[in-house]
Image: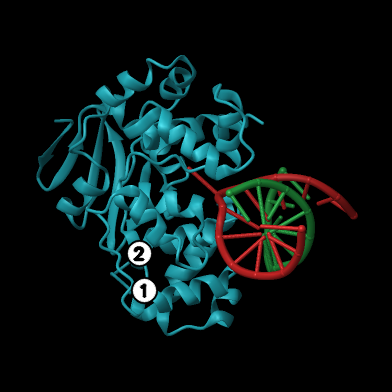
Chain colours: A cyan, B red, C green
Amino acid sequence: MIYGIQNGQIIVFDTSQFDIRQILDSGQVFRYQKLENIYKIVAKNVICHLKYENDHVIINSSDTDFAINYFDLERDYNPIKEKLKKNNFITKAVDYGNGIRILNQDPFEVIVTFIISANNNIPRIKGILNRLCESLGEDMGGHKAFPRLEEMAKRDEHFYKQIGLGYRAEYLVRTIDKIREGFSLDLYDWDTSSARKHLMTLPGVGRKVADCILLFGYHKEDVFPIDTWCRRVYRDFGLPPQKSCEKMADAMSQKLKNLSGYAQQYLFYYYRDNKIL
DNA sequence: TTCCAGGGATATA
DNA sequence: TATATCCATGGA
């Protein structure tokens, strides 16, 4: 166990597998900000405040049980890192981002977020999501929740273009419609391949976005999302060259199996933070 | 000014 | 099945 609870606060003792900045800055989540020494994260309709204190991480949340699951605190990352470090290429990335964890985010929120992320850069993704939540999110008293499906369904393509989605506005509107009409999001017990095919029927969701949804929304461990950074990772990894991102993703997950998602996250962070081109 | 960003849809062969 | 082109937007 890497955490305890005291006075309603979560205390993470093992900071060798919990680094706030690394977790937030590894491209899996975009709604957070740093104020003084406190990091504020809003996930779904829950707010979390994180800070370092006496060599521990203190988490204050409006919903403690939610936060324990969200930050994946029941999972020990040391065995995962040990296995990954048997591969020399991955070792340096694991050491560099050793406090990274994979968050357990709300699937609907992840679908919306990563449709917006396509062919986009992280600062602009953050801006769009902030405008989205500010305008459609329920006021939780000091912070806005991530908008609910029904609230998003009231707005049209023009609105989403106004807050900056560009050509992704149409995809988002059509996806919202499809979910509202009963498209199943209860994919936790689905095998990865079936869940991926299912998700890829949504407008704006291709292989890469689907894999991000599977990893960040359903904690499927056998996916390796290939974006522009991970294409460079693949180039350097030592497997036979591939032209398409799909084949790179297939090759990586075949090689790394249930460690794929974790490996991808350490490697993405290492390449992007060091601007390895 | 051109290039790029956690890519996807579409047309074409 | 595989490749080429287009797509908004803002920062570098």
Find out whether the residues at labels 2 and 1 contact each other: C-beta distance under 8 Å.
Answer: yes
The amino acid on which the numbered mark 2 sits, given as a three-letter code, is: Phe
In the picture, the disc for residue A179 is: 1
Q: Residue at x 47, y 57 (%)?
A: A114
Using the image as rendered, state which of residue C9 and residue A200 is in the foreground.
A200
Discs 2 and 1 lie in a common subunit: yes
> Can I make out residue A34 in this image?
yes
Using the image as rendered, state which of residue A167 and residue A2 is in the foreground.
A167
Q: Residue at x 40, y 76 (%)?
A: A178
Residue tagged 2: A108
- Label 2 to label 1, Cα distance in Å? 9 Å
Q: Residues within 10 Å of mark 1 (few under 14, many from 20)?
A: some
Observer-side mark, 2 or 1, equals 1
Q: Is residue A221 above or below residue A162?
A: above
Number of dots carrying numbers: 2
Among the 4 quarters of the image, the one containing residue A149: bottom left
Q: Residues within 10 Å of mark 2 (few under 14, many from 20)?
A: some
Q: Position of residue A107 (x, y in %)?
A: 33, 59
Q: Chain of mark 2?
A: A
Q: Is disc 2 placed on a helix, strand or loop? A: helix
